Amino acid sequence: MSTQDKVKINKLPTGVPGLDEIVGGGLPEFSFNIIAGAPGSGKTTLAHQFVFANATPERPALYFTVLGESAIKMLRYQQQYTFFDPAMLPDSIRFINLSQVVLEKDLGAVLEQITKEVEKSNPAVVVVDSFRTMVRKPESDMDLQSFIQRLALFLASWQATTFLIGEYAEEELRDNPIFTVADGLLWLRQTAERNSIVRKLQIIKLRGQDSVPGLHTFRITDAGVQAFSRTFGLTARKRNPPSNRRLSFGIPELDKMMDGGVREGDSLLVAGSSGTGKSVLATQFIAEGVRHGEPGIVAVFEERPEAYAERATSLGLDLETPQKDGKLTILYLRPLDLSVDETMQSILDAVQKIGAKRLVIDSLAGFEMALSPGFRADFRESLYRMIFALTGIGVTILSTVEVDESFTEFPFSTYSISFLTDDIIRLRYVSIDGQLRKIMVVIKMRGGNHAKDIREYEITSKGVVILGKRLTHYQGLISGIPVHSAQSSSKEEPPLDTGIEHKT
Amino acid sequence: MTAAPGMRDLAHRLLTYEAGAGKASEPMESPTLRVYEKLRQSLGEFVGAAGFYSLASRALALAKPEAPSLNAAQVAGDGALQGLSEIETQIDLNRDPADEEGIILIARLLGLLRIFLGEALTLSLLRNAWPGEAFDDGNAGNGRKT
């Protein structure tokens, strides 16, 4: 059978930001879905969003309420969400209460009532909230599984996309015959971790199309449920082929050390202890990009955007004008109770909004601390996913990380995140001739040349300035306590390394 | 505390409409009962009989201090209003609406809907029950025009 002979399944928008991406582009038309989860996990709100996104006067939505939240209170609360449009009631959306039928009759009568209403209204969407509360009478002629099967058959034949909402605990997921009938099973979870609530959703089952596997963070705001795909909505985008273009720091000597600059699409880690100039370097990197017409994003966690821009001004770098021109966004992210995915989505949105080519995350420690404690366990994994997604579309990322200064070790990062960076620049203090001076070395450049030189630098009113000569008169520089080399008697200036280290 | 003026006006309009409509179809039924039954039918669809009973009994309780003659009325378990016909004869629209038991009761019921659902949804509900009527009265709310 050729592709053109196969039935095409239309995908309906869920009305939930981020969820379309997770379910593979939208929910299959005429599918029979179950939204399950604990009380307060957002099941009803999610169903409402779908209803408001898809109902029309010609093909309305029927929302059957059973025993549970009273319909009038449900409408009272749901209309607080921005997606709720009262003008759509009752022409496009009808709420029908089945409590009386459930209380006085059996499931057969409930099915009959639903059938009657569906035949009368020809709906595109049917919701039964909550279908679990219908199973009240053990002596009922029709058990719940039979009811679900007949309902599913009927509603699919009537070309309705259906949602049954039910409160289920995790352990009920196994061997539950009702879930077998469903085409789609969306599971909403919420757990309390330390002082914060962590909400996650999972597409346990979705017939007919690929969904993004795993647990996805979601949040309930004034706009309703908002989901944050683990792939940040970038799965559909192809990864750019590796670029050979180099991005300048605006610091000629550093560019030389990096064989012309940072390779476009790389993730660069600048590691050093407090005061070594990580943020200065990051500011110069972003300012140089803007100067070359490359929009940039700076995500700051430890100081406010105004302070960040003011500090740049003191270095002779203008970050105010590009912000006004829409070429630069300084994001101040101190969410405290947000998920890591949600925070990263804010960064991604900003990147996509201005078409950013350079991104600075200053700093990873601040980023982690800004997260709700419950989400910190996900930090490394989520960071990896975001960096992979962004570098894949050609964004060059500079992250700063503070490392404890040790005079016995030379750590690159306290986060064990070196694996997710292509390039590493290490800054550190060193004790020389009775002074605390600073040295810089390019540790790694994946797939490119870089100098092996250990260079001394200073932070001046013009930013980071690399001093003119390589430090050859000392040994053990990276220990921070070098010893004067015995060979230091030579007066000859050593040549600078022009980039002979080749890493793959 | 009395029913809000906007709700009284709206109730008055509904009763006037039903008084006119009733003359042609069912002249013996009071306008108050006709309005009440339409609301019961329309509301009952989505709040259920028990839900409507709760609202109606609350509205009646609120209306009784304003119109003591309503003391004889009661809401049955299925939401039906009982005892009103004994109190109310044919509504006299020339009387002051504030004295009219039916207007007070309906205004209280509409007032509860406005409190719980907001004006937009309340008007939307009324448009559904009275498709021919325009409920874009500034006193009643900010609903869409029909």
Image (cartoon, rainbow, N blue to C red):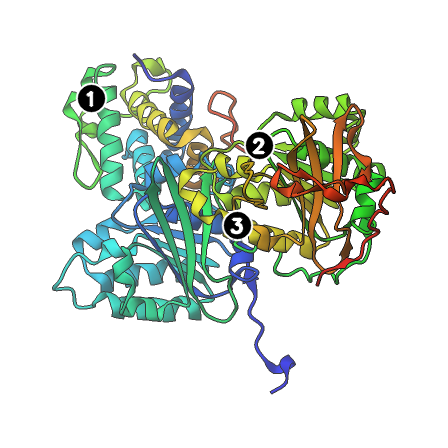
User: How crowded is the residue under tag 2: few (<14 C-alpha within 10 Å), some, or many (20+)?
Assistant: many
Horizontal arrangement in the rendering, residue A105 relative to residue B121 (left or right): left
User: How crowded is the residue under tag 3: few (<14 C-alpha within 10 Å), some, or many (20+)?
Assistant: few
Point out the frontmost of discs 1 and 2.
2
Picture layout, residue A469 above or below residue A23: above
Q: CA distance from mark 1 to mark 2?
A: 65 Å
Residue picked out by circle 2: A301
Q: Position of residue B52 (x, y in %)?
A: 27, 37
Amino acid type at circle 2 is: Phe
Amino acid type at circle 3 is: Ser
Amino acid type at circle 1 is: Leu
Q: Earlier in the sequence, mark 3 or mark 2?
A: 2
Element type at mark 1: helix
Q: Are marks 3 and 2 in contact (CB under 8 Å)?
A: no
Horizontal arrangement in the rendering, residue A362 relative to residue A448 (left or right): left
The reply to whether label 1 and label 2 mark residues of one chain is no
In terms of depth relative to the viewer, which is nearer, A480 or B144? A480
Q: Position of residue B116 (x, y in %)?
A: 36, 30
Residue picked out by circle 1: B70
Pinpoint the chain carrying mark 1: B
* Total numbered circles: 3
Residue A290, quarter of the rendered image: top right
Pinpoint the chain carrying mark 3: A
Q: CA distance from mark 3 to mark 2?
A: 20 Å
Q: Which residue of the protein is positioned furthest toward the bottom in this rendering?
A: A1
Picture layout, residue B134 above or below residue A359: above
Residue picked out by circle 3: A416
Horizontal arrangement in the rendering, residue B1 relative to residue A446 (left or right): left
Q: CA distance from mark 3 to mark 1?
A: 77 Å
Element type at mark 2: loop
